[in-house]
Amino acid sequence: MTAREASIKLGKNPKYVYLLWKRESKLLLKGSVEMKDTLLITQEGYEHLKAIVDKRSMGN
């Protein structure tokens, strides 16, 4: 899916995944985000990031 779609599904700013990628954030699963014609994130990468976001939103 696109980075924008993933960001919105996570309930974040549409540029959330892009900014993580641009800043080489360790939150992203290594190799899960790649620039083609648009920035893409794998399903595995999305699920990994979703687990982190969900955990943080629960206050842990």
Image (cartoon, grey):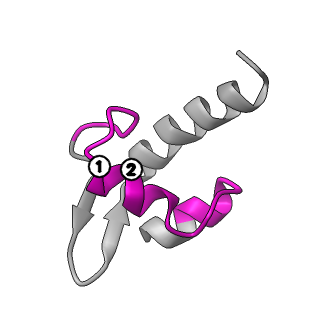
Horizontal placement of 55 versus 47: left or right? Answer: right
User: Please, what is the three-letter code of the amino acid marked with disc 1?
Assistant: Arg
What is the total number of numbered labels drawn onto the structure image? Answer: 2
Counting from the top left corner in percent of width and height, residue 55 is at 67, 25
Q: Which residue lies furthest to the front in this view?
A: 23
Q: How far apart are marks 2 and 1 (CA)?
A: 5 Å
Of 18 and 49, nearer the camera is 18
Instruction: Report which quarter residue 26 is drawn in.
Output: top left
Counting from the top left corner in percent of width and height, residue 48 is at 48, 35
Q: In this view, does 36 lie above or below 15?
A: below
Which residue occupies 44% across, 66% down? Answer: 3
Q: In this view, does 14 lie above or below 6?
A: below
Instruction: Please state the extent of the stretch shown in magenta in the rendering.
Output: 6-30
Secondary structure of residue under mark 2? helix
Q: Mark 1 points at which residue?
A: 23
Quick check: is 17 in the magenta stretch? yes
- Quadrant containing the N terminus is bottom left
Counting from the top left corner in percent of width and height, residue 49 is at 50, 40
Quick check: is 37 in the magenta stretch? no
Secondary structure of residue under mark 1? loop
Q: Is residue 13 above or below residue 21?
A: below
Counting from the top left corner in percent of width and height, residue 7 is at 56, 61
Whether residue 27 appears in this view of the structure is yes
Q: Residue furthest right?
A: 58
Q: Mark 2 points at which residue?
A: 20
Label pair 2/1, CB-CB below 8 angstroms: yes
Instruction: Report which quarter residue 52 is drawn in.
Output: top right
Horizontal placement of 20 versus 9: left or right? Answer: left
User: Please, what is the three-letter code of the amino acid marked with disc 2?
Assistant: Leu
